[in-house]
Image: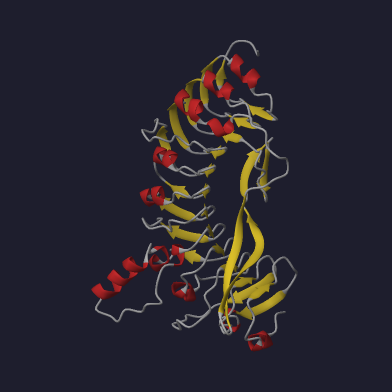
Amino acid sequence: MIPSSLSQLKYLEDLNFAGNNLGGKVELDIFLKHRNLLHLDLSANKLTVLTKNSTNATIPKFNILGLVSCNLRKFPNFLQFQDELETFSFSDNKIHGEIPTWFWNKSKETMTARIITNSTTVNPCLSSPCDSLLVLNLSLNNFHGTIPHMMGINLKMIDLSQNHLHGLVPRSLQNCKLLEILVLGNNQMEDTFPSWLGALPMLQVLILRSNKFHGAINVSQAKLNFAKLRIIDLSDNGFSGNLPSEYFENWNAMIMVKTEKFTYMQASQEVPITTVNSRSIILTLHMPPYMYSITMDNKGTHRLYAKIQKAFIAIDLSNNKFGGEIPESLGRLSGLQMLNLSNNNFTGVIPSSLASLIKLESLDLSQNLLSGEIP
């Protein structure tokens, strides 16, 4: 159990209880009294964290906030006063309803304009938490509604998987030029393939599995066609038509390259701290990196990749309605470790170009209409 006496440690800057076996109920308010607190992580315990509606704009400005698996039942209201968050992880809770609109507001100017329109006093502390966010993880909750057309432009990872979100993939994501990982799997989104995401220069992982996406995959007219993409999972949707060979001719990041083993995708967390004595001193607090994670089916097993190796390259297009022949151009993706095209309507022969996939560990072509001999 976490004692309430912690609220007396008024100079506390870093508080990390993550990954223990702590239990009981704890009021989040006891941590909001720490004006200097920059990093708070209560994730992965057996805690039940209770929140209250807060209108106090003098609460601490967090850089890192982790409340994973904390039995939260509502979206913390105090977040509307946060404008310096870099890592924000609320996955695996019991939050339901819509994500508040104020959370998505893209800039201080947007928030100010909205407040002025309502003829109220402008509060300079009100700005969007998305302004400074690098990592946003709201997976494994009960959020519903659509994703608003507002998003933080500095985001490197967005994980909204395993909720009840519906509607379209918001076009505002094309402004997230630093985005590396987009995970929208296991929702109820209805859209065609968002080929315009191919213009994002840093996008490496795209997970759209288990939604209601449909239609053919058209080649994007963007200058960059998923130039750095290494993992794509479109499984369990309603995609149809032939696979455009042009995509595989442009996915150069999936070609085998020399890479150091056992290095993982991550977001570094450096928190600037200003100390004022006789003069101002700016220090940098190096926190443990935030390790990116995804869930995929591999070798017949539904597995969580708690860490994603930089060398891992995978394509999963299974359980759709793709037809026509398997493109020969797939064979140029020599770094592929996993290729799953099962449960579709592919016809013709197995292309001999797949012999070039010398790093392949798992190949699933089952439940199609393929003919001829196994090469």
In the image, farthest residue toward the front: 278
Q: Is residue 204 left or right of residue 97?
A: right
In the picture, residue 23 is in which quadrant? Answer: bottom right
Q: What's the coloring here?
A: secondary structure
Residue 160: x and y, percent? 51, 55
| 197 w.r.t. 373: above or below | below
Look at 67% across and 84% down and name the residue there. Answer: 6
Residue 331: x and y, percent? 58, 21
| Along the viewing direction, whichever of 188 and 83 lies nearer the viewer | 83
Quarter of the image containing the C terminus? top right
In the image, farthest residue toward the right: 21
Residue 12: x and y, percent? 64, 80
| 184 w.r.t. 297: above or below | below
In the picture, residue 259 is in which quadrant? Answer: top right
| 38 w.r.t. 333: above or below | below
Quarter of the image containing the N terminus? bottom right
| Along the viewing direction, whichever of 113 and 186 lies nearer the viewer | 113
| Along the viewing direction, whichever of 69 and 271 lies nearer the viewer | 271
Look at 55% across and 64% down and name the residue there. Answer: 88
Q: Is residue 85 left or right of residue 334?
A: left
| 234 w.r.t. 86: above or below | above
Residue 92 seen from this side:
no
